[in-house]
Image (cartoon, rainbow, N blue to C red):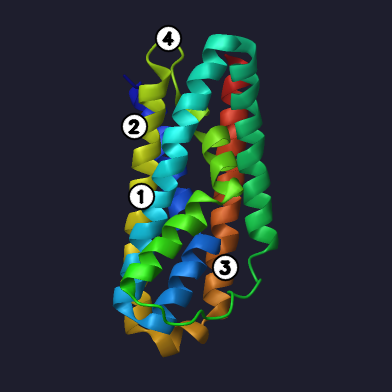
Amino acid sequence: MFELQTFALFLAAATVVAVTPGPGIFYIVARTLAGGRTEGLASSVGLGVGGFVHVLAGAIGISALVMASAEAFTALKIAGAFYLIWLGIKTWREARVPAPAEVQTTGAGRAMREGIVVEALNPKTAAFFLAFIPQFVDTSVNVALQFVVLGTISVALNTAVDLIVTRWAAKARDGLAGRPTFIARTRQTSGAVMCGLGAALLIARRAS
């Protein structure tokens, strides 16, 4: 279904996105710091479920777009490359923005439900999937199926990172707040890599 080079590029880009400390990771850290490991794990799963909602919705929308206009689909893929570059620049510029304040303890069940709602109603997540995944889709094959497969992999990577962050935050609650420089440099590096990936994708599309 996917060419090896395309799939490898997708995994590289999706991994960079997953490990980049952003609002989702800071949300998980806040939940873990406030309610402990159990609440953090529940929130991570909730965000994953909410992300999959966007994957399903995006698969339907992208299929309709491909059937309606091949030119529009190509334009969307090019826009996706610029989106990655913009996201990288934004990540770099906001690298030193502090994490949001801790949230109140709510319990695992409610933490999971709130995680689902937070992610499912996040328009930035929808925009990201619609801009990111089409760059790696082959229009000659079932587009919706490819979107679901790639989207599920992306969600799984994000959730895996969230679970790791939860475990780390639960063990190092006191040390986390004392390392803002490390977090900032990590975000700056991730932002630079994302810009590079976006530029590479843009050049490849132009060459083809």
Q: Is residue 39 above or below residue 62?
A: below
Q: Nearer the viewer, mark 4 or mark 3?
A: 4
Q: Earlier in the sequence, mark 3 or mark 1?
A: 1
User: Residue 177: where, in percent of width, then height?
Assistant: 51, 85
Q: Residues within 10 Å of mark 1 (few under 14, many from 20)?
A: many
Residue 157 image label: 1
Quadrant of the rendered structure where residue 115 is?
Answer: bottom left
Q: Earlier in the sequence, mark 4 or mark 3?
A: 4
Name the kind of residue labelled 1 in the image. Answer: Leu
Q: Nearer the viewer, mark 2 or mark 1?
A: 2
Q: Earlier in the sequence, mark 4 or mark 1?
A: 4
Residue 149 image label: 2
Query: Tag 2's secondary structure?
Result: helix
Residue 140 image label: 4
Q: Nearer the viewer, mark 3 or mark 1?
A: 1
Question: On the picture, is 90 further left or further right than 4?
Answer: right
Q: Are marks 4 and 1 in contact (CB under 8 Å)?
A: no
User: Which residue is labeled 3 in the image?
Assistant: 185
